[in-house]
């Protein structure tokens, strides 16, 4: 099993550009989520999904869109990048029921200039 | 709303010193508790978890944590740290019935040889 994979590893965008961060998991997990990690702020939940076709907002959803057309994939779209979105983005997955132990991907480091 | 507090933001220890990192959460109901570790340049990995039963849980690499329900705490301990324990440590809480994992802001541990 590859676990949770994310692409790209690094990305530089100009303000106003759009892009999609890819996330995939091969563990048949129903639950997937996106976090951003900023210094001194820990991990903050952006969006999450409890299954294909079902998504919901987390703590900091503004400026981001998600969709979940398959169990395996959960892409995160930045509609119009802003410098405040410079961060490290982590995707995670877990079983929907039970202990809620999450498995994390390697992260995407995004810089918006 | 649930929240997690990690009071130590930076900790510096010498090798062989004992470690205790504090974690307190705010939620009156049943919780699942986690400690994750992030080594430099890597993604988050699960260190240990508490779901139910014995409040003293043991994790990988000699770490342990004790759940004290009356104090809403889940402190992480290790009797003797090593240089390789240099990392950032995150406490996280999942409240039963809520499909979210809430993270603390993290504690950066530096172990000097």
Image (cartoon, coloured by chain):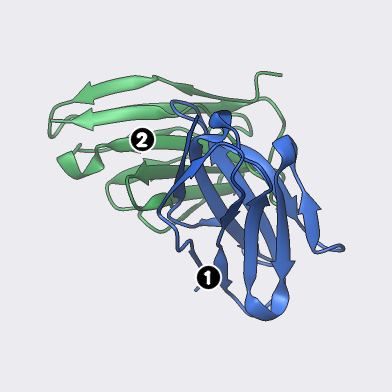
Chain colours: A green, B blue
Residue name at image x 13 percent, y 34 percent: A16
SS of the residue at dot 2? strand
Above-or-below relation of B53 to B107: below
Q: Where is residue B99 in the image (x, y as percent from the top left)?
A: 61, 58
Q: From the viewer's side, name the closer residue of A63 and A85.
A: A85
Q: Mark 1 points at which residue?
A: B2
User: Does the rendering let one see residue A88?
Assistant: yes
Question: Which quadrant holds residue B31?
Answer: bottom right
Q: Tell me the residue at 40%/54% (across/down).
A: B9
Front residue (pair A23, A42): A42
Give the residue number, with chain letter if any, for mark 2.
A88
Residue at the extreme right of the image, as rendered: B53
Which chain does the residue under circle 2 lie in? A
Q: Position of residue B74 (x, y in %)?
A: 65, 63
Q: Nearer the viewer, residue B71 or A48?
A: B71
Vertical relation: A2 (above or below) A93: above
Q: Mark 1 lies on which chain?
A: B
Q: Along the horizontal axis of the image, is B51 left or right of A11?
A: right
Position of residue B48 in the picture relative to residue A69 (left or right): right
């Amino acid at each position: 099993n590859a676990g949770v994979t994310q692409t790209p590893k690094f990305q530089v965008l100009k303000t106003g550009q759009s892009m999609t961060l890819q996330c995939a998991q091969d563990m048949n997990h129903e639950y997937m989520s996106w976090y951003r990690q900023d210094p001194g702020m820990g991990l903050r939940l952006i969006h999450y999904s409890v299954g294909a076709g079902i998504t919901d907002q987390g703590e900091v959803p503004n400026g981001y869109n998600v969709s979940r057309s398959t169990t395996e994939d959960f892409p995160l779209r930045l509609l119009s990048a802003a410098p405040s979105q410079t961060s490290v983005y982590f995707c995670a997955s877990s079983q929907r029921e039970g202990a809620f132990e999450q498995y994390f991907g390697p992260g995407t480091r995004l810089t918006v200039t | 709303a649930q929240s997690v507090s990690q009071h130590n933001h930076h900790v510096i220890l010498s090798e062989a010193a004992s470690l205790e990192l504090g974690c307190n959460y705010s939620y009156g109901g049943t919780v699942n508790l986690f400690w994750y570790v992030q080594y430099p340049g890597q993604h988050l990995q699960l260190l240990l978890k508490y779901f139910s039963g014995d409040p003293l849980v043991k994790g990988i690499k000699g770490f342990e944590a004790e759940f004290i329900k009356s104090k809403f705490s889940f402190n992480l301990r290790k009797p003797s740290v090593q240089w390789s324990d240099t990392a950032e440590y995150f406490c996280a809480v999942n409240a039963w019935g809520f499909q979210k994992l809430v993270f603390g802001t993290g504690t950066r541990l530096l172990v000097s040889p």
